[in-house]
Every structure is written in C-alpha cells, then in structure tokens.
C-alpha cells in the first residue's frame, strides 16, 4: 500500500485533526491579539515601558516549546488549556512588535494635523493612526500565524488537539509499516495550511488596507 492509498482510507481522521489544528491556532492568535494590541497601543509612545514589553515578549519566545508546554501542565493540566496558553505566549512578540512599529512609523505631521482639528486622542488612534498602521500590524499577524501552525504540532505532547497527534503517533510507531505515512500526513497538512493561510492574509491585506497606507 502506498501513501495515497493509505490516505484515502484515513482522510476523515486527517480532516478532523486539521480542523482541530486550525481552531487551536486561531484561539491562540485571537488571545494574543486581544492582549498584544492594547499593550502595544499603551506603550508605543514611551521608551521604557515599550522596551520592557518587547523584552518580556521576546524572552517568552526563547523558551523551548516542549519546556513551555510541560511547565503549563501543572497549573492547567493536559489538553487544550496549556496548548492555547502556550500558543498565545509565543504569538505575543510578532503581534506587539509589529503594532508598535506600525504606529511609530507614522508621519508625525499627520497626527499633528488631526490634533489641530480638535480630534480626541482616541479618535485619532481609531480613525487615523491604526488604519494607517494596519498593513504592518497585519504582517505581524501573518508571521504569528505561520509560526503557530508549526508550534501547534507540539501540543500533542500534552494531549492537545491538532495534527501533532498524527505526527506523534507516527513517531511513536516507528518501524511499523505505516509509521512514515502517519507522520507524513500530519506534516504535509501543516504545510498546506501554511500556504492557505498565507494566501488568506495576502487577500485580507489587499481588501482591508486603506488607499495610500501600503508600505
């Protein structure tokens, strides 16, 4: 039996694992955005808080995946909980950094003109600064998503959902006839997801970027 014959009989399991993988990545990314974007907005103007936040997020990214997933077992147990939290922590740096960079690269004259018109700080941020920074922010989300698609496979080590289970099952059954096929199914599915998400972000960038905000 070749790989394609094996996949034909196993594709429902691959589909279920793929959908679980997508959901896991989106949950981690969403939480990172809910935390990271407000933090970036609050700190991008002041040097010391900005450096502290970026340093802390960068430090989290240096923690080896297996170590972080393992450390989260004690407070969160096994399964989805530690998986989502770990992915959220890993996604914080690209989300925060790109939001900070996008906001800081704006032409000060644009903001000063809006202030001169009597616009409030919140209105300037919502209607001028953030829309103009959006392409850079979206690039951060794109990078974070690509990164999480790979890291999410490690979630299988803590009984988390996703394609990592196929890869882990394949590695655990090394030497058996279909071990390579199992691992290959999980790995190829992640590659396909990475390509599809990349195309989706490219389309989203084209549809949502205001005219004149492209960098």
Image: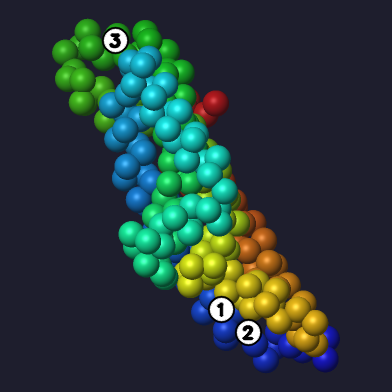
The residue beneath circle 2 is 11
> Mark 2 and mark 1: span between their CA atoms?
6 Å
State the residue at coordinates (21%, 20%): 121
Q: Place residue 132 in its image quadrant.
A: top left
Q: Which residue is mark 3?
A: 113
Residue 3: mark: none
- Position of 125 with respect to 160 (left or right) is left
Say which label, 1 or 3, has the lower sequence index. Answer: 1
Left or right of 2: which side holds 201?
left
Q: Are marks 2 and 1 in contact (CB under 8 Å)?
A: yes
Where's residue 119, x and y in %? 18, 18
- Density class for disc 3 (Cα within 10 Å; few <14, some 14-19, many ≥20) is few
Q: Contact (CB < 8 A) between labels 1 and 3? A: no
Disc 1 versus disc 3: distance between alpha carbons? Answer: 52 Å
User: Which is nearer the eye, 143 or 126?
Assistant: 143
- Residue 20: image location, x then y, percent: 48, 71
Q: Quadrant of the C terminus?
A: top right
Q: Secondary structure at mark 2?
A: helix
**Which residue does the numbered mark 1 point to in the structure image?**
15
Is residue 137 visible to us here?
A: no
In this view, 53 is above or below 139: above
State the separation of the CA atoms marked 3 and 2.
57 Å
- SS state under label 3: helix
Q: Judging from the image, what secondary structure is the residue with disc 1 in?
A: helix
Residue drawn at 70 percent across, 74 percent down: 171
For label 2, count other residues whose C-alpha is less than 10 Å away and answer few (under 14), some (14-19) or many (20+): few
- Image quarter hosting the N terminus: bottom right
Q: Nearer the viewer, mark 3 or mark 2?
A: 2
**Disc nearer the start of the sequence (3/2):** 2
**Viewer-side label of 1, 3:** 1
In the figure, residue 57 lies in which quadrant?
A: top left
């Amino acid at each position: 039996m070749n790989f394609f014959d094996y996949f034909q009989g196993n594709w429902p399991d691959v589909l279920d694992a793929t959908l679980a993988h997508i959901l896991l990545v989106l949950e981690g990314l969403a939480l990172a955005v809910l935390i990271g974007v407000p933090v970036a907005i609050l700190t991008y103007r002041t040097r010391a808080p900005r450096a502290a936040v970026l340093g802390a997020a960068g430090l989290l990214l240096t923690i080896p995946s297996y170590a972080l997933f393992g450390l989260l077992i004690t407070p969160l147990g096994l399964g989805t909980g530690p998986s989502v939290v770990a992915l959220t922590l890993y996604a914080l740096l690209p989300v925060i950094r790109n939001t900070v960079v996008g906001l800081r690269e704006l032409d000060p004259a644009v903001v000063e003109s809006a202030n001169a018109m009597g616009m409030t700080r919140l209105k300037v941020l919502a209607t001028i600064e953030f829309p103009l920074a959006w392409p850079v922010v979206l690039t951060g989300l794109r990078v974070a998503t690509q990164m999480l698609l790979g890291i999410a496979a490690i979630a299988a080590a803590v009984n988390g959902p996703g394609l990592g289970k196929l890869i882990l099952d394949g590695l655990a059954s090394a030497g058996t006839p279909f071990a390579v096929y199992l691992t290959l199914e999980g790995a190829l599915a992640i590659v396909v997801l990475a390509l599809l998400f990349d195309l989706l972000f490219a389309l989203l960038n084209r549809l949502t970027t205001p005219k004149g905000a492209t960098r």
